[in-house]
Image: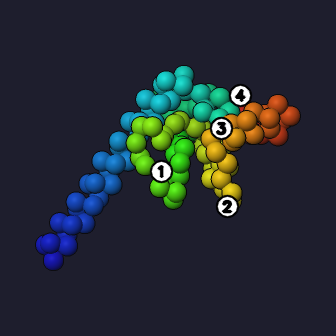
């Protein structure tokens, strides 16, 4: 009983430490990107740093190689991307490489077929 409680507590703590670490990577990435999305280059908001609260433009940690494909939670595999781009990239079964997806997003933006912020 005590043992299982202890294990559960340790797992919770470990999960928290991990998500906190990813958060730190995400924030440092976002700062290096001037808070612009890695793909669409729109200004993102996060943790009250940027007042624009456009839901789709929330800053998220984007795994270049998805975890499901063996990508890690390390600095080299995480960039900052808006929620919209992040969701669209990982939707469906055929994942585009970051480079291909970036070109795809830029093309879509040019023809007005990507998410348009209200601001
Ligand atoms: Zn984006």
For label 2, the crowd category at 10 Å Cα-Cα, with few meaning under 14, some 14 to 19 and many 20 or more, is: few
Q: Earlier in the sequence, mark 2 or mark 4?
A: 2
Cα–Cα span, label 3 and label 1: 16 Å
Front disc: 2 or 4: 2
Q: Secondary structure at mark 3?
A: helix
Q: Nearer the viewer, mark 3 or mark 4?
A: 3
Q: Which residue is mark 4?
A: 119
In the image, 63: left or right of 98? left
Label 2 SS: loop
Q: Nearer the viewer, mark 3 or mark 2?
A: 3
Q: Which residue is mark 3?
A: 99
Q: Provide residue 97's location: percent of width, then percent of height.
A: 64, 45
Gap in Å between the C-alphas at discs 3 and 4? 27 Å
Is residue 43 in view from this perspective? yes
What residue sits right under mark 2 in the picture?
Answer: 93
Packing grade of label 4 (10 A; few <14, some 14-19, many >=20) is few
């Amino acid at each position: 009983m005590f043992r299982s409680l202890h294990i559960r507590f340790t797992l919770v703590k470990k999960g928290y430490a991990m998500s906190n670490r990813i958060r730190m990577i995400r924030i440092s990435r976002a700062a290096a990107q001037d808070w612009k999305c890695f793909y669409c280059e729109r200004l993102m908001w996060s943790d009250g740093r940027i007042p624009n609260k456009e839901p789709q433009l929330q800053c998220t940690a984007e795994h270049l190689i998805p975890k499901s494909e063996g990508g890690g939670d390390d600095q080299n595999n995480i960039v900052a991307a808006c929620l919209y781009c992040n969701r669209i990239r990982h939707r469906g079964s055929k994942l585009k490489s970051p480079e291909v997806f970036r070109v795809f997003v830029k093309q879509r933006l040019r023809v007005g077929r990507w998410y348009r912020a209200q601001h």
